[in-house]
Image (cartoon, rainbow, N blue to C red):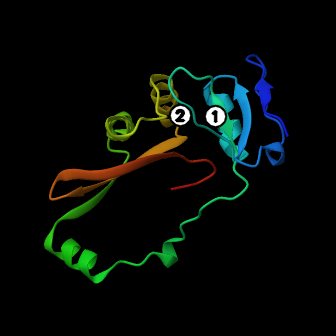
Amino acid sequence: MSVFQLDQNLIAFPDPALADPDGLLAVGGDLSADRLILAYSNGIFPWYSEGQPILWWCPHQRFIIRPENIHISRSLAKYMRKHKVRILWDRDFADTMHRCRMLRENAEGTWITDAMEQAYAGLNKIGCAMAVEASVDGVIAGGLYGVILGIIL
């Protein structure tokens, strides 16, 4: 298997089944909304570091968290009863993504580049990305962002 070079002017990807065993499928292209939507629609996502070309990944195995299998421990349930825990949907997408970047950047480095922040903010503006945060007693405690396609909320 080999890694495919994407054409900057053609928004297309090779068959995801052709990804390397580690999941690397392609390199290059851009982070335009059209390319990101096509990528995510096919299980492909960008993941690279500042100074690298854009690397596109499609791992053969995925981890899935099924809500019905989540277990809330007694200590967490007790904590939640004692504190005001709120879930916030799309409070401030750019802020949530930037906070994710800063936490990673300060710890071990990050794949969230300036270009990725801008690209995903663009996806949020057209309704294809969303952020979710949890606050405890009015203070943001954590969050995540992601791409949403074909979901009606």
Pick the front one: 102 or 147: 102
- Residue 38 falls left or right of residue 85: right
Q: Is residue 75 visible?
A: yes
Give the structural element (helix, strand or loop) at label 1: helix
Label 2: state its secondary structure.
helix
Look at the picture and state if 59 lies above or below 114. Answer: below
Residue beneath disc 1: 36
Q: Are marks 1 and 2 in contact (CB under 8 Å)?
A: yes
**Mark 2 crowdedness (10 Å alpha carbons): few <14, some 14-19, many ≥20:** many
Q: How far, Cα to Cα, is label 1 from label 2?
A: 8 Å
Q: Which mark is residue 123?
A: 2
Q: Is residue 32 above or below residue 1?
A: above
For residue 147, above or below residue 101? below
Could you classify mark 1 by the number of other residues whose Cα lies within 10 Å: few (under 14), some (14-19), or many (20 or more)?
many
Q: Is residue 123 above or below residue 83?
A: above
Residue 40 drawn at (x, y percent)? 66, 43
Mark positioned earlier in the residue sequence (1 or 2) = 1
What residue do we see at 24% from left, 79% from top? 75
Query: Residue at point 34% right, 40% down?
Result: 107
Q: Residue at x 41, y 78 (%)?
A: 71
Residue 113 spot, x, y in % from top left: 47, 27
Q: Is residue 77 left or right of residue 35?
A: left
Question: Is 11 in front, or is 16?
Answer: 16
Q: What residue sits 73% from the left and 45% below the top?
A: 42
Q: Amino acid at mark 2?
A: Leu
